[in-house]
Amino acid sequence: MDKDYAVRIHQRNLLITKIIWGFWLLFSIVAFGADAATVGILLPGGLVCGLIPFLLSHRPQYAVLTMYVTITLLFSLCTAVTAFHPSLSMFIFFWLVLVMSSLYMQVWPIVYAGTLTFGATCVFFLYQADLTSGQMILYDVIPFGLLSICLTIFLVVNSRVSEQLCETAEHNRQEAIEAKSQMEKLLNRLQKSAERKMEHMALHDALTGLPNSRKYRIFLKESLARSASSGRKTAVLLLDIDRFKFINDSLGHRFGDELIREIAGRLRECMGTNQIVARQGGDEFMMLLENVACTEIEDMANCLLQAVSKPFMLEGHELIVTPSVGISLYPDDGYTVDTLIKNADTAMYRAKEQGRNTYCFYTGDMKETSARTMLLENHLRRAMENKELVLYYQPQICLRTGKLIGAEALLRWQHPHLGWVFPSEFIPIAEETGMIVSLGAWVLEEACMAARHWQKEGYSSFRISVNLSARQFRDQRLIDTVLGILKRSELEPEFLDLEITEGMAIHHLHDVACTLEALKKAGIHISIDDFGTGYSSLSYLKSLPIHSIKIDKSFMRTNEEGQEADWAIVSAVITMAHGLGLTVIAEGVETEEQSDILKAMDCDVIQGYLIARPLAMEEFEKWLRGQQSQSLV
C-alpha cells in the first residue's frame, strides 16, 4: 500500500472512530438514569474500544487495523441502541448496511453523514420512543440527505485544495531534490577539482611547473619496466648548477628563483616533448632518456651543457652559469630507481671534481670512491673524540739569519683501520659537511696551546701558522673564536699567523678585508697561502691588510715534462711583494740549490724538507732542542 494513501485512510478511520466513540459516551451518559447495569457495560466497553484507535493515531501503517476497530465499535454501538429500543432494529440494520458498505467502498460523505444522523436519531429516541414514519423521515432521512450533499461538496472542495497543496508540496519537493542534486554535483566537481589540484601540487614543482622528484621516480619506474621488455637502454641524467649558492648569496633568492625558471625553460626546449625533465630541488634537475644509444645520450648531454651555458639576461644583469651532469644507464649501472639515481648523483659530483661544465658517465670505481667518502665522513665525526687527529709542525727559517721564525701547524689523521688519511681526502669532506668549523677551531686551539707550551719551556718565541678554510672565514663568530682561544691559551696575538688562500680573498674581497682588518688590529699576523696558483692580482693585495705571502711549492719543482722551476715568476713575485712591504715565504724548498737561488732573489723565509719534514709535537720539541743547542755553540 502506498504510504500517503495509507495515511489518508488512517486519518479518516480515526475521525469516524472518534465520532462514534463520542456518541457512545453521550449515549451512555444520557441513559445513565434508565438502566445503570447497561451503562456499566457500555461505558467501560466504549472507553476500551475507543482507546485503541487513539493509541494507533501516529501509526499510518495500521490503517486497516483502525478500520476493523471502527467496524467493531459500530457493531457494539448498534447492539447497545437495539438493547434500549428494540423498535429501532430495522432502522439500525439498514443504517449499518449503508455505513458499512460506504466504509468498505470509502464513500466518505455517506459514512460521515450516516454516522451523524444515526447519532441524532438515537438521541431523539431516548426522549420520544413512539416516533412515526413521517417523523423518522423528517428527523433522519432528510437531514441525512442534506448532510451528505453538504459533506460531499465540502470533501470535493477539500480534495481539490488538498490536491493542489499536494501538487505544490510535490513541486517544492522536486525542486528541493533538484537543488540538492545540483549542489551535490557542484560539490563533486569542486572536490574533484581540488583533488586534481592537490595531486598536481604533490607531483610537480611549484617554482618551475616541472615534475618533482616523486613524479620522476614514477616515470622512471615505468620506463624501466618498458626497457626490460625491449632490451634497450634507459639513461638517468642529473644536472646541477655550478656555484649556484654564490648567485643566491650575492644577488638574492628572488634572482636565484628567476634563474631556475629560465634554466627549466631551456632544459624543456632541449629535451623536447617526448623526454622527461624534472626538478629534484634546489639547483638540481633530473632528465630521463628512454630507448637511446650511448651516442644519443652524449649528444643530449652536450646539448644540455650548451643550453645552460648561454648567457642569461635577468633584470638587467648578464649572467653566465655552467652545469655539471652525471649519467647512469639501465641496465649497466643498476636495475632499481634508487640505484640509478644514486649512481647518477655520484657521476655528477665526479664531473664537478673534473672542473665543472662537463658531463660524466658512472663507472664502477666511483662506487668504491663514494663508499670510502661516506666511510670517512662517518668516522671523521668521531675522530676528534677518539684522538685520531694530531697536529704536525713544519719549521720556517729566515734565510738571512738562519733562525727559526715560525712553524706551520698541519693536520693529520691516523685512522685505526685505514691508516694515515691524507688531508686532501678528508678536508674537502669536512668543508662540505660543515665539520670544518669545529675542526678548525680545535686545530687553532691545539696549535696555540703548543706554541705557548714551548714558550714556557724556554724555547725562543716564534710565530705559529694555522690555515683557515673558506667555511671558517664565513663564520660570523670567527673573530670571537680566535680571540677566545688566544685568551685561554695565554698566547700573545703577535705569535699567531692565520693563513687564507687567494680564492677566499678574491671571491669575498669586501667581507674578507673587514674581517682581516679586525684580526690585524688585534695584533694577529695575516698571510696569503699558495700565492701564484690563483688570481695573483696586485689590486687585491693592496686592498687587504696582510703581512706576508707564501709562494706555492709548485713553482719550486721540476714538472712532469722535465721543465725546470720557473724562477722568473718567483723573482717577479718577490720583487712585487717587497714593493708592497710584504714578507715572502717560499714553500716546498727541498735542496740547497733552491735555497741559494731564493736567497739570491732576496726571499725572506723558506719552508720545506730541506729544513725538516712536518713533525709530531714530541719530535718537533727534539728538533727545537737541537736548534737551541746549535745556536749556543
Image (spheres, grey):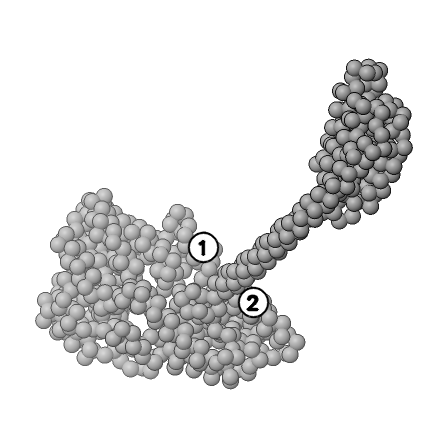
Residue 383 location (% of width, % of height): 40, 51
Q: Nearer the viewer, residue 171 or 305?
A: 171
Q: Is residue 508 left or right of residue 186?
A: left
Marks 2 and 1 close (CB-CB < 8 Å): no
The amino acid on which the numbered mark 1 sits, given as a three-letter code, is Asn
For the point 71% across and 43% down, which residue is it?
150
Asked whether residue 591 appears in the rendered view, the answer is no
Q: Is residue 408 left or right of residue 144?
A: left
What is the secondary structure assignment of the residue under circle 1? helix
Count of picture labels: 2
For the point 17% across and 53% down, which residue is it?
495
The C terminus is located in which quarter? bottom left
For the point 22% across and 49% down, which residue is it?
480
Residue that carries the numbered disc 2 in the rendered image: 218
Q: Is residue 483 left or right of residue 437?
A: left
Which picture quadrant has residue 97?
Answer: top right
Residue 609 location (% of width, % of height): 28, 65
Which picture quadrant has residue 38?
Answer: top right
Residue that carries the numbered disc 1 in the rendered image: 378
Q: Nearer the viewer, residue 276 or 192?
A: 192
Distance from Cα at disc 2 to Cα at disc 1: 32 Å
Q: Mark 2 or mark 1, which is nearer to you?
A: 2
The amino acid on which the numbered mark 2 sits, given as a three-letter code, is Ile
For the point 83% across and 34% down, which residue is it?
134
What is the secondary structure assignment of the residue under circle 2? helix
**Disc 1: CA contacts within 10 A as few (<14), some (14-19) or many (>=20):** few
Residue 408 vertical position relative to residue 24 in the rendered view, above or below: below
Residue 179 vertical position relative to residue 264 in the rendered view, above or below: above
Q: Nearer the viewer, residue 465 or 597?
A: 465
Asked whether residue 22 appears in the rendered view, the answer is yes
Residue 70 location (% of width, % of height): 80, 34
